Image (cartoon, rainbow, N blue to C red):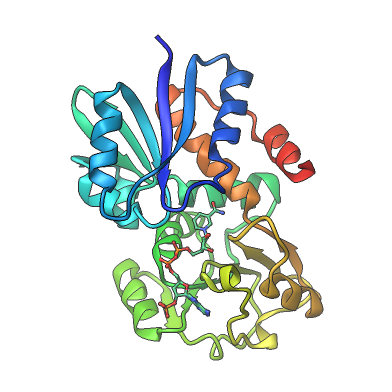
Amino acid sequence: MTDRYAVFGHPIAHSKSPQIHAAFARQTGQDMTYEAILAPLDGFADSIAQFVTAGGRGANVTVPFKEEAYTLAQRLSPRAQRAGAVNTLVFNAEGILGDNTDGAGLVADLTRNLNHTLAGKRILLLGAGGAARGVIEPLLEQQPAALVIANRTVSRAQELADLFGHGVAACSFEAANTPFDLIINATAASLAGELPPLSANAFNATTLAYDMMYGRDTPFLSFARTQGAATADGLGMLVEQAAEAFFVWRGVRPDTAAVIASLRAA
Ligand code: NDP
């Protein structure tokens, strides 16, 4: 019987995940389907329960349900536990397992696709929401020289710095005013077409500016270019977090480069 998977979100029509997982399944010969399901804002748990009853084997979870998925899961992977959010669910005889592949996806994109070494580097992470929290531990595992979290609400950045400890600092956007090797925009500002009030001094010609947003040029990337920095969007992270989820479900690692290239061409 064909195995069923889906992504749950609200909204969900824009999601590229069905396309990505269909490409992975074709490429690796997996007998599976993957659909996009719009869950009502107050009905995420019910939507998941219906999908499990109908034979669903696993799911991805996107905005705004990642924290609800964390509480819904009966067991959590260590990385989901640390992220405080779940983007991947596995349904099996032991119940619902919650995992988080966003951080692994970001690190894979940076290190494998963009050849950007993180060890010994100074990293500035913009934002303190779910996306930022999910990538902190995987970034720290790469042993950067420093990780500074800057956020509009500085107290939220400070909470994350306190939570992760060992060498993580917090500040306002404006206070991050010395050069960083890597600046990751994990705020939702790009969604609104806005630029956080960053200091030009955070960038130089060797900085890589990475926006988790994808699909369009953003004020953050264009500001970074004017400071001479190299830039990358979050499309590679999207495909890599999907590949990690695919591996969790199917035990097979798909080739991501071809899928990233075809999404870019489209
Ligand atoms: P959250 O709503 O959890 O967090 C939003 C963050 O952005 C907060 O730190 C908030 O600051 C900050 N923020 C919101 N608006 C502004 C603004 N106008 N100026 C400055 N800061 C702002 O969102 P997520 O963490 O879930 O998602 C953040 C982004 O990451 C989204 O664009 C999302 O699409 C992207 N993403 C991409 C992925 C990929 O695979 N490429 C995966 C996951 C996320 P404050 O605390 O002050 O409110």
Residue at the (21%, 46%) spot, across then down: 72
- Can you see residue 18? yes
- Can you see residue 254? no
Residue at the (24%, 25%) spot, across then down: 53
* Residue 61, image x, y percentages: 39, 45
* Residue 68, image x, y percentages: 27, 53
Position of residue 239 relative to residue 137, above or below, is: above
Residue at the (75%, 39%) spot, across then down: 261
**In the depicted view, which residue is nearer to us: 100 or 178?**
100
Position of residue 47 relative to residue 148, above or below, is: above
- Dividing the picture into quadrants, the one containing residue 214 is bottom right
Q: Is residue 94 left or right of residue 70?
A: left
**In the depicted view, which residue is nearer to us: 17 or 29?**
17
* Residue 115, image x, y percentages: 70, 50
* Residue 143, image x, y percentages: 50, 59
**In the depicted view, which residue is nearer to us: 123 or 36?**
36
Position of residue 207 relative to residue 37, above or below, is: below
